[in-house]
């Protein structure tokens, strides 16, 4: 059913990710791990076309961008993982003509049913975040499932019941939890670090949050490093003149 | 946005078909049975044929056309689903109307009821097609208030030129009302498109790369997530036709103007060449509609392009 379920009822979960832009190092481990898990799980196959050819293409559910902000001493580069934000009011769900795209009532995960998707691509047009990628080979739309086949999977050890991207992150920049629960560690992180929504003015109400980069620490105390001496402009000492003479002879 | 040929063919062909169908419905409702069996039968077949070709072509771009029937289920939330439901629903009064209309001396009240309901359903279907695009908050050029009127007026104008040409071929080029309706519809189509183009050209950007990334202020892209183009870029980042927009807009305006002059000539000159003029007008108005629809896609910028280097949309 592509009409949205009732949200914000007591006890209803809002599962999602909190991504720390301060500690993400852009290693792509989350993207690779996501691809590896999802090409054999719920979204299988997550097709690559000509992966070793001159123009490889394929559906990925997680993409890591690089952006820079600020100027001069305040310039900084940062890595920006982008995937489905499991919005509370996702237009990608309501535009779906078949009911293949849906939002789960119990935990808010947005999924595509690969057996009823007709591959019309309208949901990808409705998403401002570019979260959905069409699988040309499979003929259906693919998107982040929040690893629905891991987080509830009794066959995995409890510590492995996390989205593959979170499990893979070597710097702990990705956090998974219930954002409806104010006491959860993800909600606490959002509160402590000023977690924010992407494009809040579009009113899709993303569940996933991003943590801003921490302000730069200035350990020099504002003292600028001394400029380097330009080469060839010496102090006129004897040693200097000797080296200068050797330089001339050799050149 | 990437302009898929199947979607352009679908929206223009079915648009013309629904426009013609609506005009035929109103003709039957106001004038009773068709004056000539073959005129009536050929006109109905052209209208339903264009609609059917358009609807079938819209399934070509689907990943799973065999599942297309599922698209009738979500009419409560999806404009695409509503369009599918109405497109099929329109066939019912349209076929009944067509059968009754081509027969001589049909019951005029029944004909009027069927003709008017066919016309209404045809136009509502076109509105649903337009709303598929106009309802997307991610593409600001499609949220413009002229999108629905443009779809409607192009449907009526291309349908009217078709009806005029069919009437001419069957020796009825001099019907004053039809000539006037066709010329006015072509004029309005050009005017509506002009208002739309001026509107989108003067749209101030409201979303920035800073809003998209949440980093605010001055944000620049320094590294793409992938080395070759992905689905998001090829589908949402289409740029080819955008740079030819000015010339293509002039082609749309020129074709509409030429079609208008040909209809006027065929209508007023009472020459034997009237059917030739009228058929040429059909071709020209068709080109105008296809180029206009191409631009509608190619000039539309998607919010997601902010993640891929566009500074504002």
Image (spheres, rainbow, N blue to C red):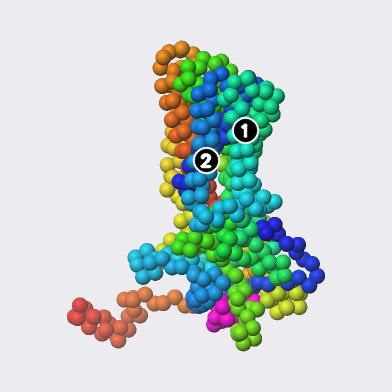
**Residue found 75% across the figure and 64% down from its top:** A7
Please tell me whether residue A167 belongs to the stretch shown in magenta: yes
Does the residue at mark 1 contact the one at mark 2 (Cβ under 8 Å)? Answer: no
Point 44% across, 30% down: residue = B284
Secondary structure type for disc 1:
helix
**Looking at the image, can residue B218 be seen?**
no
In the rendered structure, which disc, 1 or 2, sits on the residue that comes first in sequence?
2
Q: Position of residue B48 (x, y in %)?
A: 54, 35
Q: Is residue B243 above or below residue A214?
A: above
Q: Quadrant of residue A85?
A: bottom right
Front in this rendered view, residue B102 or B296: B102
Dots 1 and 2 on the same chain? yes
Indicate yes or no whether the magenta region holds residue A155.
no
**Mark linked to residue B212:** none
- Secondary element under disc 2, as helix, strand or loop, is helix
Nearest to the observer: residue B250 or residue B39 = B39
Which residue ends up furthest to the right in the rendered image? Answer: A10
User: Vertically, is B115 above or below A215?
Assistant: above
Residue in front for this viewpoint, B297 or B226: B297
Subunit that carries the residue with mark 2? B
Give the magenta part as a residue range: A164-176
Task: Identify the residue at image location x=62%, y=24%.
Answer: B28
Can residue A225 be seen here? yes
Percent from the top left, x then y, of residue A123?
A: 58, 57
Given residues B246 and A165, the one toward you in this image is: A165
Name the residue rendered at 59%, 34% in the picture: B95
* Residue topped by disc 2: B52
The circle on residue B96 is 1
- Quadrant of the image occupied by residue A87: bottom right
Separation of residues labelled 1 and 2 (CA atoms): 16 Å
Chain of residue at mark 1: B
Q: Residue furthest top?
A: B270
């Amino acid at each position: 059913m592509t009409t949205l379920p009732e949200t914000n009822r007591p006890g209803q979960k809002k599962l999602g990710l909190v991504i720390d832009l301060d500690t993400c190092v852009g290693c792509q481990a989350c993207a690779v791990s996501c691809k590896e898990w999802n090409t054999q799980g719920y979204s299988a196959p997550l097709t690559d076309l000509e992966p070793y050819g001159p123009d490889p293409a394929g559906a990925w559910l997680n993409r890591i961008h690089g952006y820079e902000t600020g100027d001069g001493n305040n310039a900084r580069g940062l890595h920006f993982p982008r995937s489905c934000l499991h919005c509370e009011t996702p237009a990608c769900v309501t535009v779906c003509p078949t009911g293949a795209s849906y939002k789960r009532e119990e935990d808010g995960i947005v999924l595509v049913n690969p057996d009823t998707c007709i591959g019309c691509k309208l949901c990808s047009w409705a998403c401002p975040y570019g979260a959905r990628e069409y699988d040309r080979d499979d003929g259906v739309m693919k998107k982040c499932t929040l690893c629905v086949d891991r987080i509830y999977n009794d066959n995995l050890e409890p510590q492995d019941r996390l989205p593959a991207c979170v499990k893979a992150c070597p710097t702990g920049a990705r956090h998974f939890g219930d954002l409806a629960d104010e006491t959860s560690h993800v909600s606490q992180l959002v509160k402590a670090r000023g977690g924010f929504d992407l494009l809040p003015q579009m009113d899709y109400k993303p569940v996933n949050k991003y943590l801003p980069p921490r302000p730069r620490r200035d350990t020099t105390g504002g003292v600028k490093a001394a400029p380097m001496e330009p080469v060839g402009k010496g102090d006129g000492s004897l040693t200097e003149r000797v080296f200068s003479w050797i330089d001339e002879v050799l050149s | 946005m990437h302009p898929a040929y199947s979607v352009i063919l679908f929206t223009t062909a079915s648009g013309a078909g629904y426009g013609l169908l609506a005009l035929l419905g109103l003709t039957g409702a106001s004038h009773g049975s068709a004056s000539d069996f073959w005129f009536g039968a050929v006109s109905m077949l052209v209208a339903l044929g264009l609609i059917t070709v358009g609807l079938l072509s819209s399934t070509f771009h689907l990943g799973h056309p065999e599942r297309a029937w599922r698209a009738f289920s979500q009419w409560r939330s999806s404009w695409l689903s509503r369009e599918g439901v109405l497109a099929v629903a329109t066939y019912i009064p349209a076929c009944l109307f067509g059968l009754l209309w081509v027969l001589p001396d049909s019951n005029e009240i029944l004909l009027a009821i069927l003709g008017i309901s066919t016309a209404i359903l045809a136009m509502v279907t076109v509105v649903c097609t337009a709303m598929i695009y106009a309802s997307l908050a991610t593409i600001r050029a499609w949220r413009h208030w002229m999108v629905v009127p443009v779809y409607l007026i192009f449907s009526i104008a291309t349908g009217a030129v078709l009806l005029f040409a069919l009437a001419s071929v069957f020796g009825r080029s001099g019907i004053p009302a039809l000539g006037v309706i066709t010329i006015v519809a072509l004029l309005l189509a050009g005017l509506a498109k002009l208002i739309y183009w001026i509107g989108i050209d003067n749209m101030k950007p409201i979303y920035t790369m800073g809003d998209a990334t949440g980093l605010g202020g001055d944000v620049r892209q320094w590294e793409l997530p992938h080395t070759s183009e992905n689905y998001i870029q090829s589908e949402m980042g289409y740029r080819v036709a955008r740079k030819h927009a000015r010339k293509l807009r002039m082609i749309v305006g020129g074709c509409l103007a030429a079609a208008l002059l040909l209809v006027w000539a065929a209508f007023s000159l009472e020459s034997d060449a009237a059917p030739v003029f009228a058929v040429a007008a059909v071709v020209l108005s068709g080109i105008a509609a296809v180029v206009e629809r191409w631009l509608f896609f190619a000039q539309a910028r998607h919010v997601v392009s902010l993640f891929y280097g566009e500074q504002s949309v």
